[in-house]
Image (cartoon, rainbow, N blue to C red):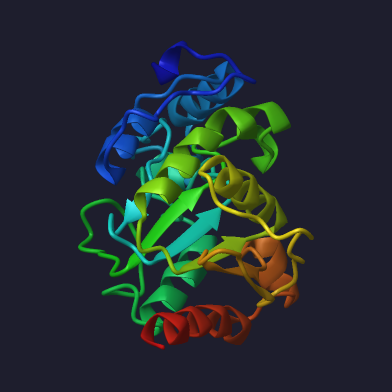
């Protein structure tokens, strides 16, 4: 079971036959002691503005359409975002940007993601992440990323009609490529380049991989990433799926 693993080992989800099954395994995971301690401590101490809320304080499962043709890959939950709300990219400014772009491209039924049960649904899109627990300083270790990788690798295997992948940030980009290879996907002889809205068609009928700057406050507040730039990525994904 995943909860019996230690950092640097691989959790086993090869027997899981659905995205829902992977979600259940993720939520129960206690594989990385450092991340377990951190996510639960954050949930106990809380941020002052959220002191009356009950934090999720557990790993985050992928969110969205289990039959998705678009996979969005992030880095990890935010301590007071997803780790609080229990949903990917929910409860922080990064999520405001991401779900707004997904809505404008027709992948979401509403532009905001506030909390679980708010009516948000994704169509043809699934949001996953390289690491499923909020890490200290937003930096999972190499070993923690390797431990978590089988979850996204199995999701890739189960998304049998996957056409487009959007990787939010370089770490997510690299994590997806490793997971894609673990899932049996063929990688090009030269590693695809990372650059905003740079697309690489993966070989042998693989999906189109689109690199995207992460909608972090560091990027959005400095203008490194603008709404138009983010919209261009998801409009490109929409054109491929409609194409």
Tell me residue 83's x, y (percent).
Answer: 45, 40
Q: Quadrant of the C terminus?
A: bottom left
Query: Residue at 49% of width from left, 38% of height from top?
Result: 132
Q: Tell me: residue 93, above or below residue 44.
A: below
Q: Residue at x 55, y 51 (%)?
A: 185
Residue nearest the observer in this picture, 118 or 157: 157
Horizontal side of residue 104 vs 79, given as left or right = left
Q: Seen from this angle, which residue lies furthest top?
A: 4
Q: Nearer the viewer, residue 182 or 88?
A: 182
Q: Look at the image and tell me whether residue 235 can be seen.
A: yes
In the rendered image, the vertical position of residue 6 relative to residue 35, given as above or below? above
Q: Is residue 117 left or right of residue 232?
A: left
Towards the viewer: 44 or 190: 190
Please state if 70 lies on the left or on the right of 225 as rendered.
Answer: left
**Quadrant in which the N terminus appears:** top left
- Residue 134 placement (x, y as % from top left): 54, 37
> Quadrant of residue 200 in the image?
bottom right
Q: Quadrant of residue 131?
A: top right
| 242 shown above or below 49 | below
Query: Can the viewer see residue 133 in this picture?
Result: no
Single out the residue that lies furthest toward the front: 204
Residue at point 51% right, 29% down?
A: 39
The number of numbered badges drawn on the structure is: 0
Question: Residue 220's spot in the image, x, y percent?
Answer: 66, 71
Where residue 13 sits: x, y (%)? 39, 29
**Residue at (33% x, 28% y) in the render:** 15
């Amino acid at each position: 079971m995943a909860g019996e693993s230690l950092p640097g080992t691989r959790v086993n989800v090869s027997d899981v036959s659905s995205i829902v099954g992977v979600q259940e395994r993720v939520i129960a995971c206690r594989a990385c002691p450092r991340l377990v301690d951190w996510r639960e401590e954050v949930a106990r101490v809380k941020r002052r503005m959220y002191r009356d809320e009950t934090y999720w304080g557990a790993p985050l499962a992928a969110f969205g359409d289990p039959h998705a043709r678009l996979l969005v890959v992030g880095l990890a939950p935010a301590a007071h975002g997803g780790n609080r709300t229990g949903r990917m990219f929910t409860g922080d400014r990064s999520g405001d940007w991401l779900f707004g772009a997904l809505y404008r491209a027709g992948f979401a039924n509403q532009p905001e993601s506030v909390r679980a049960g708010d009516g948000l649904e994704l169509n043809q899109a699934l949001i996953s992440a390289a690491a499923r627990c909020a890490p200290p300083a937003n930096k999972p270790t190499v070993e923690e990323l390797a431990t978590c990788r089988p979850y996204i690798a199995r999701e890739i295997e189960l998304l049998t009609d996957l056409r487009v992948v959007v990787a939010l940030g370089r770490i997510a980009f690299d994590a997806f490529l490793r997971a894609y290879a673990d899932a049996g996907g063929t990688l090009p002889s030269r590693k695809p380049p990372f650059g905003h809205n740079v697309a690489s068609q993966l070989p042998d009928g693989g999906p189109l991989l689109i690199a995207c700057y992460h909608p972090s406050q560091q990027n959005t507040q400095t203008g490194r990433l603008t709404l138009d730039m983010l919209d261009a990525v998801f409009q490109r994904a929409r054109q491929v799926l409609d194409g």
